[in-house]
Amino acid sequence: MIENCSHYFARGNTARGAHFLYGSAFEGLNRIYVLTGPQGTGKSTVIRSLADSLLAKGRHVQCFHSPLRPDELDGIIATELKIGIVDGRVCEGVPSKETGETVTVNFAEALDNSRISSKDLETIDDLKGNLIEIYSKAYETFLTALRIHDEWEKYYIESMDFMKADQVTQELIQDLYAGHENDTPTAGRHLFFGAATPKGAFDFIQSLTAQLERRIFIKGRPGSGKSTLLKKLAAAAETNGIDVQVYHCGFDPNSLDMLIFPELSTAIFDSTAPHEYFPDRDGDEVLDMYTRTMAPGTDEAFAAEIADIKERYSAKMKEATAHLASAEAIDTQIKAIYTAATDFAIVEELRLQLQSELNELLGPYPLTK
């Protein structure tokens, strides 16, 4: 059965702070509905309901998940309609100048302010301050972990044969792109396939690559050139007019973790922890950057130093994850106050309004198989 839903993240809690890719992910849409209002006023529930309705009608839906609660949606795109629906509170970068019409739907209208006491308002202010503080701690801890990761990479970078790494890149460019080039350059679409969440790393690699004919699993060590390889491949794809989806690392968004070439039915991705997978079907292959580019014996030569780094890195990642869990708990408290003051009959009216507008747009569009 062909999956009619694609799953992504377009915001992340990273070593570079809160990072948003919505500007790229939602570029070129005809219309975006921006749902405004505080957490707890039904926005994510309505977005999920609209997604389910589109799927029930056989439409393809792109689902953008919350890194704080991956089972909740920050936004969706009705692919055939080129319509986006997003929670404006968490989707920085939407709308952008590259998108079409913007329609704002204010879910704060459903709030009954008489149900929110002055004490509640004081509590919300305190909790919001605590939330900012705990997010800052999480980002600082992730950054410390990244600096430790840099120490880890250094041992392998110093052992790398850069000429061999460049040879691997050129071989892949020839292998992937030969015969598919055209004279019109493309611009990659930038996304996350995973995120740091309160329960640890979470990813959608398997679902995003399930229908592709070819998957290249890049193996290697930190600093063995995996991200650099992907950056060069992405740049070459754009120059050669080949559509590419560019997936950034949810820990360090300056690095890349995966490319998908829809027209080539191919993915190439960093298949190491915390998103380590192994070939399990026809069309899967492994590219081992350690054996292709590293001086033999590097692991053994620095085993003690690397073991110490791994231990320190793991401890900081666990600490940062604990901060995200605290952030979720605080956000839940804020959400509960607003939810208790929300008139969900009004939320339902807003949902029906959005559903009606989508139904009207669906009329002239044939199903895409």
Image: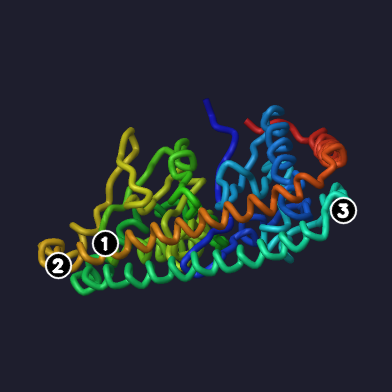
Disc 1 marks which amino acid?
Answer: Lys
Q: Position of residue 294 (x, y in %)?
A: 18, 64
Which quadrant of the figure has residue 356? top right
Specify the farthest residue to the front: 119
Q: Position of residue 15 (x, y in %)?
A: 46, 67
Q: From this view, report whether residue 364 is shown above or below residue 169.
A: above
Q: Nearer the viewer, mark 2 or mark 3?
A: 3
- Total residue callouts: 3
Q: Nearer the viewer, mark 2 or mark 1?
A: 1
Circle 2 — which element?
A: loop
Residue at the (56%, 61%) spot, across then down: 186
Disc 3 marks which amino acid?
Answer: Asn
Please state if 82 lies on the left or on the right of 316 as rendered.
right
Visible residue check, residue 84:
no
Tell me the number on the disc at residue 302. Answer: 2
Please state if 300 lies on the left or on the right of 187 as rendered.
left
Tell me the number on the disc at residue 113. Answer: 3
In 3D space, how far apart are the residues under numbered discs 2 and 1 (Cα atoms)? 12 Å
User: Which residue, given by chain and number where applicable, does mark 1 sit on?
Assistant: 310
Q: How is the image coloured?
A: rainbow
Circle 1 — which element?
A: helix
Q: From this view, report whether residue 345 is shown above or below residue 101.
A: above
Pick the front one: 92 or 209 = 92
Check if mark 1's residue and mark 3's residue have beta carbons within 8 Å. Answer: no
Residue at the (18%, 71%) spot, across then down: 159
Disc 2 marks which amino acid?
Answer: Phe
Which quadrant of the figure has residue 95? bottom right
